[in-house]
Amino acid sequence: METERKIAIFGLGFVGLPLALSFALRGCRVTGVDVDEKLVSDLNRGITYHLESYRGTPIQEILKEQLETGRFRATTDPDPALASCNDIIVTVGVPVTNGIPDLNPVKAAATAIGRGLRPGQLVLIRSTLTPGTTRRVLQPILESSGLKAEADFFLAYAAERIAEGRAFEEFENMPTVVSGVGPRSLQRAREVLGIATRAELVEASSIEVGETAKVLENIARDVDIALVNEFARFTKALGIDIFEVVKVANTHTRVNLLLPGPGVGGYCVPNALYYLLPRALEFNLNLRIFPVARQINDEAPVHAAGLVLKNLPVPPNQAKVAVFGIAMKDYSNDDRLSPAHTVIKVLQTAGVQVKAFDPAVPTRYPFSAASLEEALRGAHGIVVLARQRDLDYQNLAFFRELMSKERPFIVDTRNIYDRATVEKAGFRLETL
Ligand SMILES: NC(=O)c1ccc[n+]([C@@H]2O[C@H](COP(=O)([O-])OP(=O)(O)OC[C@H]3O[C@@H](n4cnc5c(N)ncnc54)[C@H](O)[C@@H]3O)[C@@H](O)[C@H]2O)c1
């Protein structure tokens, strides 16, 4: 147990909170710093909506336990945390608006850290960044403290790779790429990362390699998903099932296709291209495949909405549709950039009344249904966009009772349903 180590973690979101608790579980004293006052106050009262668990213990219990031991607390005030910690970890994100990455939050975090930075501290950046940001943007801000990276304080980069829902397990077991501005920074980062991970720490020869590899990893998923999403258009025209085609193709030992779906959401994959483009523009590079992949995945929810509109038995302005799953992917509570938002917007713009049910997403929207019954009552059809644990997708007789008496439809973008079962229950089934 690392009982002497004090760590300040900036950003207490999907990455920062489970990371902070991972260090606390291993004995470190962790102060989480976040600008979101409500989040900080919720966390200090033991409230979080994340769907993480570690060895069967839900994050809610881990949070309460670590608050009780005093090994974790959250604050909006960075100064006391900086005054007493050995290591500082940054997990503040880079939001993208209209294709433009906004470095202000991460710059603001670096400015706050720079004000309180002391000799001997490590600043370990774990955010996904436009390649070059750590050295070109964050290092000068940190050095405005008067301290020099590598000589007076340590500066390193190790992109976070976890998938939401598997954070604790992946902090522990996912190989992590680490790089530093110099060998001392690298060594110190290795020491700190080694507290929470037993997986390999892969050294990158420069911070730029680490930053760029992370962007590549995310863009690779975007391209891979675009590939199968585009292929789904072909298999549908051919009258065969894309999920079966992918399954069969994946029996080739060197093929590892992903699954198609209603689009790509969340913070990481859709934003990655926009972290790359500003640098490509500086070099006058015309990158072709990545923007096309992004466009295909951006169009996927519009396509899914089109499948719904095509199946409406009444004009759209007389129709009601139940959406199952607002989350950006199966079993997630995160609906940032979720394809569901586009699907719902397209349907609403066409005049359809939409009620969406997702037992895991805490945010309430005007289209949110408080219950499954509310979503289904009088609906002409269902569109399934994400799986959730607390929703019984196979309760078809119950759905049928609540829905419009005309033969309702199900648009299944997640490959949940068996055609014969659905049709026997009195539904029409539309797949990708
Ligand atoms: N979500 C994932 O699964 C995932 C996986 C791997 C990597 N990442 C990367 O990790 C980073 C964080 O992602 P996330 O999903 O946790 O984001 P998030 O939005 O859930 O969390 C970021 C937190 O930072 C806080 N914040 C903003 N400005 C701040 C400041 N100046 N000081 C302190 N806190 C501040 C926000 O209030 C928020 O709570 C991003 O760079 C993301 O690309 C995310």
Image (tube, helix red, strand yellow):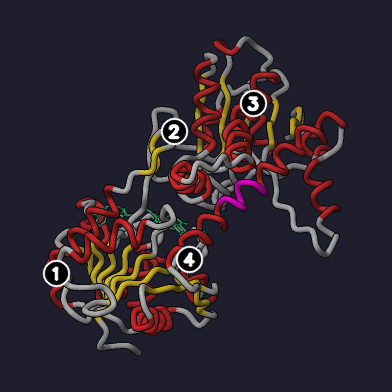
Q: Secondary structure at mark 1?
A: loop
Q: Residue flagged by tag 4: what amino acid is it?
A: Gly
Query: Which range of residues does the magenta coloring cover?
Result: 219-224
Q: Residues within 10 Å of mark 4 (few under 14, many from 20)?
A: many
Q: Is residue 257 left or right of residue 185?
A: right
Check disc 4 and report the residue beneath it: 210
* Numbered circle sitting on residue 412: none
Residue 359 seen in the figure:
no
Question: Dominant secondary structure of the magenta stretch?
Answer: helix
Q: Residue flagged by tag 1: what amino acid is it?
A: Gly
Q: Is residue 305 magenta?
A: no
Of badges 1 and 4, the one in the foreground is 1
The one of 205 and 300 positioned closer to us in this rendering: 205
Q: Is residue 380 left or right of residue 256?
A: left
Residue 19 is drawn in which quadrant? bottom left
Q: CA distance from mark 2 to mark 4?
A: 40 Å
Check disc 1 and report the residue beneath it: 146
Check disc 2 and report the residue beneath it: 368
The quadrant of the image that shows the C terminus is top right
